[in-house]
Image (tube, helix red, strand yellow):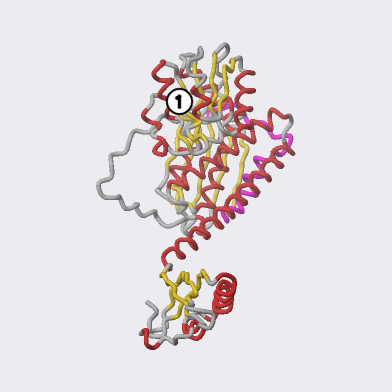
Amino acid sequence: MMGAASNHIPGDWKSGFGAVMHPDDREAAVQALETGIEADGRYRLECRIVRPSDGSTFWASSTGVLLRSGEADPGRVVGLVQDITASRMLQEQREGLVAELDHRVKNVLSAVQSMAAQSARKALSLEAFLKTFSGRLKSMASAHALLTATRWRGASMGSIAAAELGGIAPGQTRWEGPDLILTPRAAQAMSLALHELAINAVKFGALSVETGRVDVRWLSLPDGGLELQWNESFGPRVAPRARRGFGATLLEEVTGRELGGEVTLDFRREGVSAVIRTAAGAIAQPLAPEPEPENEPEAAAEAPVMPAYGGPARIDGLKLLIVEDALLLALELEAGLEEAGASIVGSAADVDEAMTFVDQPLDAAVLDANLNGASVMPVAEALAARGVPFVFATGYGDSRFNLAGFDAPVIRKPYDVTQVAAALAEVTGRA
């Protein structure tokens, strides 16, 4: 292992073991060895070893003890050297992943902070701010979900359009185009762009009336980029805007820079038209299929996911149980559902606490799938046995907790209370 025959390694530990230590590690390792021997006759250290035979390097963990037969005996060190190269590589990979995660989280928090400040600056009321801001957060979350599914290699334009438009006015929206993959950065920007256009159409444009229509097409440009065309028709007459909102700024400036291209808006009287052009750098390579493990079990059916948009829900008088380990989110749910007329029978943060409410008179429940690392399935099974309907709230995919095993809708985090209310109305037959 050391790359030298035992009779070629000097008997003195400093000139022997110390001689094969990597130069960058030698001083600290020798100091650790000497300090341990002088203190209690024992040492433990980790360092890189350079094999004299071929110059190759490996990480070693060494532990040893000084043995003496008497006071006059200078003693000898007996120890064990282990090759820990593989474990050190795993440790370095973990540290790299943690550093990358820290970087991404800080970027996300910075983006959320900026979006909150800009949304608040342009909002006319607190209610308008909360509605607009939560919608933009959900758009960011949907983009992250798409990217997570591909291990952050990119997202297809079709999946982005489906995520942002699929839950809005079924039958009034249509999208089509070639199978193009956007880079993670471009995918997040495009998701926000489509979200802003969709929200504007729902509030003021073609999707504010039943006769309206939105057509979205995208195509490849000769320079390798992408052009997306958004056209609204058969909606109300579009009036000139008296003030410029953050949505327009996001579309024309922020999204344009993120996509490396340009965004143009035309508020035509017959309907809003937008053209988004990206640089070639926004397009990623086609995603290679992930290798399928041998003997992989058949995938379970996915639980139904509630759309991000919907009208007011009738939940007045419902007796509800909330199972959510995030205190602030639980408080928001309680307040919002009570404002909608529901009665909160109990709020629990873990499985044991939730089980104490299962036998109470309940009309429905909201279940966080992951309770500080524990599955909420025991609570779901107990409620199902009593015939109490429930909805899942989760930031995980279905496979993480086998949510499809229950006939219950799933609400993806982050969400707003109106989504939860709509799901509760559905499972209790009030939709």
**Residue 337 in which image quadrant:** top right
Q: Is residue 91 above or below residue 23?
A: above
Query: Residue 47 versus residue 333: which sits nearer the camera?
Result: 47
Q: Residue at x 45, y 46 (%)?
A: 157
**Residue farthest to the left, as pictured:** 295
Instruction: Kindly state the secondary structure of the residue where label 1 is placed.
Output: helix
Q: List x then y, in percent, for residue 317.
A: 57, 11
**Stretch in magenta:** 234-260
**Residue 128 in which image quadrant:** top right
Q: Quadrant of the N terminus?
A: bottom left
Question: What's the amino acid at mark 1?
Answer: Val
Query: Residue 55 versus residue 157: which sits nearer the camera?
Result: 55
Q: Residue at x 50, y 79 (%)?
A: 70
Q: Is residue 126 above or below residue 286?
A: above
Q: Is residue 144 above or below residue 367?
A: below
Q: Going by the image, does 260 lie left or right of 304?
A: right
Q: According to the image, label 1 marks what residue?
A: 379
Q: Residue at x 51, y 48 (%)?
A: 187
Q: List x then y, in percent, for residue 219.
A: 45, 49
Number of numbered discs overlaid on the protein picture: 1
Q: List x then y, in percent, for residue 305.
A: 45, 31
Query: Residue 313 versus residue 366: which sits nearer the camera?
Result: 366
Residue 252 falls inside the magenta stretch: yes
Q: List x then y, in percent, for residue 169.
A: 49, 27
Observer able to see residue 211: no
